[in-house]
């Protein structure tokens, strides 16, 4: 079945006010499908975010991210630590059936989207949920991460790096919607509307009110600092590119 319009939400990271703001957008409410490209839960309101998204019914299609996987592994005793400091807190607040639900999520999915054809949705890259690719990653890097991808996949939608972009790489359109809950570069809840065009969107919302709500509702010890830093996008896009750049395999001067 071909889908005319898809709203893509990535890297919500358990920020319920940001998610609520995006779901209230008329074009999200009217989209035939909402695709989540991972890192849905690792944040201050992990359980509440899952509940709200599941309440949207079968219109929502889920893809797991590395942070979702890490929460499951932590809860199941398969790892003792999570790289993100808020991870253990988020994991402990999931109900057991929510852990089982996250464990069953696919690593990717394919939809036939109007004017795009077969679109692959994943978290980081089509082959790995932690690999880094950026808007300025070299073409050789894109060739690596596209290895084994069927020729009829002409659009790839990913998340992971929390920065929105659209670019061409080896004839494929690559789309990153940015982050709903933990944006880098500028505040707001970032997402994408796909089909027939490729529209990067940002939904403004009341960040001081959202910050106050997180502080009131969440007993994570560092929630005040966490909410101030991430909701206000204190990390610039330059900061993020500097931090992520070495992880995409580039070398100095390449």
Image: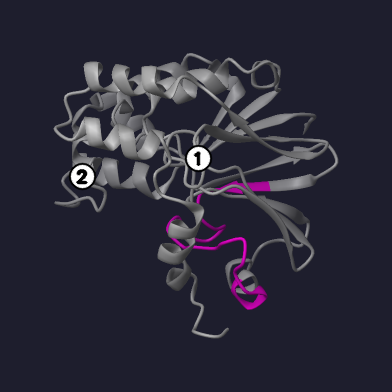
x and y percentages locating residue 54 in the rendered image: 46, 19
Which class describes the residues within 10 Å of circle 2: few (<14), some (14-19), or many (20+)?
some
Q: In the picture provided, is 171 more to the left or to the right than 106?
A: right
Q: Residue at x 56, y 35 (%)?
A: 190
Q: Earlier in the sequence, mark 2 or mark 1?
A: 2
What predominant SS class does the magenta segment belong to?
loop
Mark 2 → mark 1, Cα distance in angstroms: 23 Å
**Quadrant in the rendering for residue 246:** bottom left
Looking at the rendered image, the quarter that the C terminus falls into is bottom right
Q: In the picture provided, is 254 more to the left or to the right than 239?
A: right
Residue 244 covered by magenta stretch: no
x and y percentages locating residue 170 in the rendered image: 75, 68
- Part of the protein shown in magenta: 120-141
**Residue 237 in view:** yes
**Mark seen at residue 27:** none
**Mark seen at residue 179:** 1
Looking at the rendered image, the quarter that the N terminus falls into is top right
Q: In the picture provided, is 209 more to the left or to the right than 60?
A: left
């Amino acid at each position: 079945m071909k889908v005319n319009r898809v709203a893509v939400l990535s890297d919500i990271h358990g920020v319920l006010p940001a998610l609520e703001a995006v779901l209230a957008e008329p074009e999200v409410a009217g989209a035939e499908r909402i695709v989540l490209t991972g890192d849905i839960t690792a944040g201050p309101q992990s359980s509440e975010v899952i509940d709200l998204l599941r309440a949207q019914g079968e219109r929502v299609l889920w893809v797991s991210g590395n942070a979702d996987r890490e929460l499951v592994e932590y809860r199941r005793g398969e790892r003792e630590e999570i790289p993100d400091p808020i991870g253990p807190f988020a994991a402990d607040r999931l109900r057991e059936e929510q852990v089982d639900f996250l464990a069953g999520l696919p690593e990717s999915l394919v939809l036939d989207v109007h004017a795009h054809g077969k679109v692959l949705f994943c978290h980081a890259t089509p082959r790995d949920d932690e690999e880094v690719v950026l808007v300025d990653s070299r073409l050789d890097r894109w060739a690596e991460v596209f290895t084994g991808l069927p020729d009829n996949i002409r659009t790839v939608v990913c998340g992971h790096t929390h920065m929105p972009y659209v670019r061409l790489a080896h004839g494929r359109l690559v789309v990153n919607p940015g982050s709903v809950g933990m944006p880098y570069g500028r505040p707001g809840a970032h997402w994408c509307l796909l089909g027939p065009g490729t529209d990067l969107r940002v939904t403004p919302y009341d960040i001081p009110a959202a910050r106050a709500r997180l502080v009131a509702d969440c007993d994570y010890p560092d929630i005040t600092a966490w909410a101030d830093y991430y909701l206000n996008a204190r990390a610039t896009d330059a900061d993020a590119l500097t931090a992520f750049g070495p992880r995409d395999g580039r070398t100095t001067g390449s």
